[in-house]
Image (spheres, helix red, strand yellow):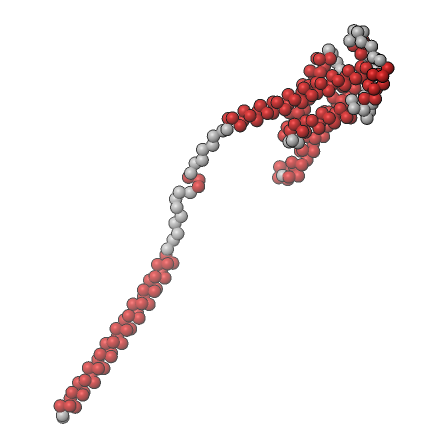
Amino acid sequence: MSVNGVTSTQAAAAYNYSAVESTKVDASKTENTAADKVSGAEADKGAVYEPSKETASSVKKTYTPDTNLVNKLKADAEARTAQLRSLVEKMMTDQASTYGKANDIWSFLREGNFTVDPATKMQAQADIAEDGYWGVNQTSDRIIDFANALTGGDPDKIEDMRSAFEKGFKKAEKTWGGKLPDISQRTYDAVMEKFDKMAAEAKKASSAADPAGEQ
């Protein structure tokens, strides 16, 4: 056997061995990469999101009453009811005076110190007529309109306005010096009926807006 033949055989064997080892290394790298991917995927599956332990419920909010605003609102409400009481007192007194002039009872109620002239009596009679300025309908409507204007139509203020009206009416009686004439009594009844109607409508509207409240 020649030296060249041996050398060639040895070279071929060495080459084949190197190729096999290279293939083993590549396979090992492939296996390791696949294992890394699987390990990463498992790690992703096992990851759990943990929200911050500091939630909104753990933060306490402090509420401080606005004393100045409360006092302002109370003063405003008192001023509005005082306005209505004053208006009612004046309106009822004026209505009674007009009624007295129209029915020749003014002199009797004022101890005979005043006599109604024909023109004044005629105008007074027109004013206290059913559709007159001081009639029951117009007078009661003006009182209700004024109450609505003072409260902005707030249904929660109906009873406050009713109370103010009653106090104003009593003051008018005191100013008058006794029970007011029949027209004023009928006006009182008309106003109370209109307050009742307002309260009923407000309750109906509230029930319609909140059906669950009826149960």
Residue at 61% over, 22% down: 79
- How far from the left and from the top, in percent, is residue 207? 65, 37
Q: Tell me, yes or no, if residue 196 can be seen here.
A: no
Residue 30 screen position, x and y as percent: 31, 71
- Asked whether, in this view, residue 153 is left or right of residue 39, the answer is right
Compared to residue 93, the image places residue 13 above or below, namely below
Q: How many labels does the image show?
A: 0
Residue at the (67%, 20%) spot, across then down: 85
On the question of residue 80 being in view, the answer is yes
In the displayed orientation, state which residue is furthest to the bottom.
1
Q: Nearer the viewer, residue 69 or 157?
A: 69
Please state which of residues 191 and 152 is positioned toward the viewer in this rendering: 152
Relative horizontal placement of residue 36, taking residue 188 as reference (left or right): left
Q: Measuring from the top left, give residue 212's x and y in whole percent.
A: 62, 39
Name the residue located 83 percent from the left edge and 12 percent from the top edge: 116
Figure quadrant of residue 102 = top right
Work out whether residue 29 or residue 99 is closer to the camera in this orientation and state it.
99
In this view, 60 is above or below 12: above
Q: From the viewer's perspective, tell me whether residue 101 is left or right of residue 58.
A: right
Check the image and report above or below for 119 versus 131.
above
Q: Where does the C terminus fall, quadrant-wise?
A: top right
| 152 to the left or right of 177 | left
Q: Which of 118 and 17 is in front in this view?
A: 118
What residue is rendered at 63% in x and 30% in y? 156
Q: In this view, does 114 lie above or below 143?
A: above
Q: Position of residue 108 (x, y in %)?
A: 81, 9
